[in-house]
Amino acid sequence: MSDHRPSPFPVLLNNDVCSLIQAATDVYQIRFKNRAANAYLVRGSKRTIMIDVGLSSNYPYLVECLAHLGVSPADIDMVVLSHEHLDHIGAAYHFNGRTIIAAHRLAANKIMLRDDFSMLRKMFNEPDVPIDIDLWLEEGNLIDLGNFRLSVMYTPGHTSACISLFDQDKGLLFAADTLMPGGVMGGVFGSGSISDYIQSLERLRGLDSKILLSGHGRLSDTPHDDVRIALQRSHALLSDTAQLFDALDARSNFEPIMQSVRDLNKLDDS
């Protein structure tokens, strides 16, 4: 059954390409209406940060939303990248040199080496420009903004490099593609794994979170329901995958399938 409750989050700006939504005091979601991930602005008493910035093609709309709040790109002290996928980080190069750009060390390595396969450059048709990572993050780091204190949580699964940020005092959970409203899963890509996904979701389930600020879709004030559903789905996916590999347990059966995939890839490139 669909949820027809009115949203508790006020929409401050809405046009054909993006929306600006207030998630909490001094916390804003910029939601793009194409394939780009959500961007978040957090205005602290000491410093201002963004969490993800979307595709490079959306940068003018990102600037427009910031201007609506009286913020310019030069006012951003730090950009935190949740993982390496370009729908989340494509516009980050616009901040090179004037803003500290931070990511988990595994994401930083892929981004700095311009690992196009891991970053999904072909999928998003992003320009091949360098994104400099100034700060390599680890589990347990704390980003202190004064009136916000964001703990860095290493939450792999979607990729090997995913992080979530959590403000325990305010119950704000920035979960990127690890958890989305309605328990939607962000998918398992390349370096990720379903089992890591499950472990990360179990960690998120243990938090006293009040608002879920995810990489795609709406804001959610029911994060505990979201994570419960996501765990059910991820366990089902793990079970389905196990059954698939049981059916393909002989290498003689598996190799022809892999060859057909290779052949399809050649056709796509021709």
Image (cartoon, grey):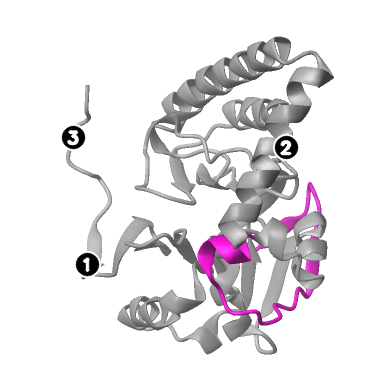
Which stretch did the figure color magenta? 120-147
> Is 173 displayed left or right of 242 in the figure?
left
* Coordinates of residue 178 in the picture (x, y in percent): 58, 40
| Type of the residue with mark 1 | Asn
Q: Are marks 1 and 3 in contact (CB under 8 Å)?
A: no
Determine whether 207 is above or below 127 in the image: above
Disc 1/disc 3 C-alpha distance (Å): 20 Å
Front-most of residues 129 and 178 = 129
> Is 182 displayed left or right of 177 in the figure?
left
Determine whether 186 is above or below 131 in the image: above
Lower sequence index among marks 2 and 3:
3
The disc at residue 35 is: none
Lower sequence index among marks 1 and 2:
1
Q: Are marks 2 and 3 in contact (CB under 8 Å)?
A: no
As helix, strand or loop, the secondary structure at mark 2 comes to: helix
* Coordinates of residue 93 in the picture (x, y in percent): 62, 81
The disc at residue 259 is: 2
| Type of the residue with mark 3 | Arg
For the point 74% across and 78% down, which residue is it? Answer: 132
Report the residue marked by disc 3: 5
For the point 72% across and 10% down, which residue is it? Answer: 246
Task: Find out whether residue 137 is within the magenta segment.
Answer: yes
The disc at residue 14 is: 1
| Type of the residue with mark 2 | Gln
